[in-house]
Amino acid sequence: MTDDKITRPQISTHMPSGSPSSLPLGLAERGYSGVIQHLSASDAGSALSDVELESRLIELGFVEGAKVEILHEGIVGRDPIAVRVDNVTIAVRRREAMAIIVA
Amino acid sequence: MEAPLLHLALVGTPNSGKTSLFNALTGSRQKVANYPGVTVERKEGFFVTPLGRQVSVVDLPGTYSLRGRSPDEEITRDIVLGKASGETRPDLVLCVADSTNLRLTIRLLLELKRTGRPIVLVLNMFDIATRRGITVDVAQMANALDVPVVTSIAVRKGGTADLLKLTDEISAQIQPEPQENTWRPLSVAELRATQREADRIIASTVSLPSRPDTWTARIDAVVLHPVGGLIVLALILFVMFQAVFAWAQPLMELLSSSFDALGQFVHDTLPAGLLQSFLQNGVISGVGSVIVFLPQIIIIFLFILLLEDFGYMARAAFLMDRIMGGAGLHGRAFIPLLSSFACAIPGIMATRVIDNRRDRLTTILIAPLMTCSARIPVYTLIISAFIPAKQVWGFVNLQGLVMFGLYAAGITSALLVSFLIKFFMLRDYAPAPFMLELPDYKMPRLKSIAIGIFTRAKMFLQRAGTTIFSMMVLIWFLASFPQPPVGAADPAINYSLAAILGKAIAPLLAPVGFNWQIAVALIPGMAAREVAVAALGTVYAIEGGKEAAEQIGQVLATKWSLATALSLLAWYIFAPQCASTLAVIRRETGSWKWMATTFAYMLALAYAASLATYNIAVALGAG
Ligand SMILES: Nc1nc2c(ncn2[C@@H]2O[C@H](COP(=O)(O)OP(=O)(O)OP(=O)(O)O)[C@@H](O)[C@H]2O)c(=O)[nH]1
Ligand SMILES: [Mg+2]
């Protein structure tokens, strides 16, 4: 891993959906549950291209309107996280989860 | 005239039960386990439908889309699109879904429809869905999707009857004229649209009770706890390695004394001479000394199979992701590495699920450092000859502890090598994402565990009967000829080819404390690690002369110093003593270069480790 800190952008710059309570899933705490507002791959800083990251997230069921809940997190940097998406559990790193905007 | 062979392909999201279905249809015994990414190659099988139609079916790696992001997914894509060379496009695609989790499969199905192939949706694991109170309006779903839909329970006898019936009905109507393939990689917008469409269809045909799998949630609360989970993982590994040593002991002693008795019987019944020596020293001491380890091999496989079937492997990968990341490894590397404790070959194949090329290569390079089951005979032999079987701290068996230490040394060095690769070769490298479905736990099924163990035991015995046996014949021959001149004073073996060869190489190995007998054993040991044990058995049995066969361990204890024994243990942590592993590395990386790299770096590490171990041990007075 080149850097262990998840870059935590200012929440205020990340409210493209306009809802005051929306945040990237990558910043949410364990136990958080919400609904996906939209995907914003360019905010994630993933090694994947924006299109590729967005495609993969959709293929794993992360689409607008899906219910998500953070069930578990790892020990190093509270990463990765285990996310319940509807009725599947998927492990992702917080870095990629930054692309998932929830509220 | 007979109808032509009907070609089916099993496609679906990972872990939906494709291989279970394949096994049920064809009576095969391909590997099934409860984590995504078990199948990494194409496997073909055949069966006959109730109406007598001959069918060929291919089992494929699971995938979420046809984009083919990793080597295993490319296999599936190429078969479905008919791009694989020498492959017929499937006449019918069976899209296999986990009925408790339909969203992703139905999206995949909508994508598959664009290939123009006739499709059937198989709602597998319908038993679990029913138990959870999920109901599916099958007829309406078939209507909405415009494909036939059938339910199945792949792991239950008769659970595929409906599918077989449907196959007969459909095969009668399949049009031979080619349908247009309009598939091309889906854009993000199209992906989203197909997922929306899938969700809409599910909403109108499936009713989900709000009763999630509470068992999985309860177990995960412990097993995925940030701290507790790691403790559980460490405990599991510790118990596994202790068990390999402690539980197997009685059975191994039984086997070993039976072989001794057999050797004695041959000794007593046959006249002294070449035939007696061949049977007693070559076959029974050699091959027998390897077969003795069967109980240990079975125990390690039992543990790994149980973890795999229960659904723990994906959890372990989750827990280890960031920790392994520190050493430059990807979380998905965990399962291949853990499988390498059984054997590096399936471990290396399993790296196909890693989509990033560099992550995959690193994993392949270090997989052979994981202590595979073929090292167990070598370790056990030396440990039981040189390490006293006492209890430490009241409950831990010292021999088991040394065994655990050897496993730990393998793991540590693998992490170190990976760290160095990352540091020196791949510095500017952004970590590839880790995305993995964590399946619900399933009760391991006795039958599949039994089949798994039986298959492994059979493979082990087959190897003992073929590779190891033929190596033994060779060694026995080398160690017996030429015969000593009449009236020679030294043991006969000193005049043999083996001694000449061994003594020629021995100077190279003298700095690490190996004698010529070890040198002789290491050469055939290149074919497979256990062979070295068998070779030592034969060489020392012949050297020991015609006295009743002593157990090889007891012989070693008198012939070697502790320093030599420790040095050989260190050697085996690293040495690339396995021709098949090297061949698989060559195949999976597609290059001789990486095979040679693996061989060279492991050999260098082995020599260095043995050199250090030997000299330190001698300095401490163990020479
Ligand atoms: N209860 C139940 N379990 C099933 C059924 N089909 C498969 N399983 C279990 O589901 C798990 C996954 O089965 P596999 O056949 O390995 O799945 P796969 O689709 O081949 O998985 P990959 O090769 O990883 O894509 C195993 O633990 C099976 O025992 C079923 O119909 N009912
Ligand atoms: Mg499979």
Image (cartoon, rainbow, N blue to C red):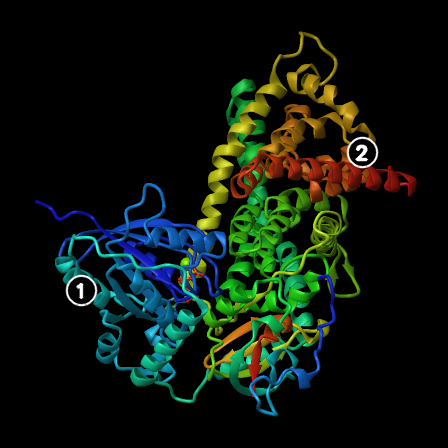
Horizontal and vertical percent position of residue B128: 37, 76
- Above/below status of A30 relative to B29: below
* SS for dot 1: helix
- The answer to whether the beta carbon of the residue marked 2 is less than 8 Å from any atom of ligand 1 is no
Foreground residue among B526 and B91: B91
The N terminus of chain B - image quarter: top left
Q: Which mark is residue B436?
A: none
Label 2 crowd bin: few (<14), some (14–19), many (20+), radius 10 Å: many
Percent from the top left, x then y, of residue B546?
Answer: 63, 24
- Report x, y in % for residue B37: 48, 60
Chain ID for label 1? B
Q: Nearer the viewer, residue B277 or B298?
A: B298
Q: Residue furthest bottom?
A: A20
Q: Are marks 2 and 1 in contact (CB under 8 Å)?
A: no
Q: Is residue B267 visible?
A: no
The image quadrant of residue B554 is top right
Which amino acid lies under the numbered mark 1 shown in the image of this protein?
Lys
Question: Tag count in the figure?
Answer: 2
Q: Residues within 10 Å of mark 1 (few under 14, many from 20)?
A: some
Amino acid carrying mark 2 in the image: Val
Residue B165: give its label: 1
Which numbered circle lies on residue B512? 2
Helix, strand or loop for disc 2:
helix
Which is in the foreground here, disc 2 or disc 1?
Answer: 1
Horizontal relation, residue B346 to residue B334: left or right: left
Looking at the rendering, the quadrant in which ligand 2 lies is bottom left
C-alpha span from label 2 to label 1: 67 Å
Is B490 situated left or right of A85 in this image? right
Image coordinates for residue B399, horizontal then vertical, percent: 73, 53
Q: Chain of mark 2?
A: B
Disc 2 and disc 1 on one polypeptide chain = yes
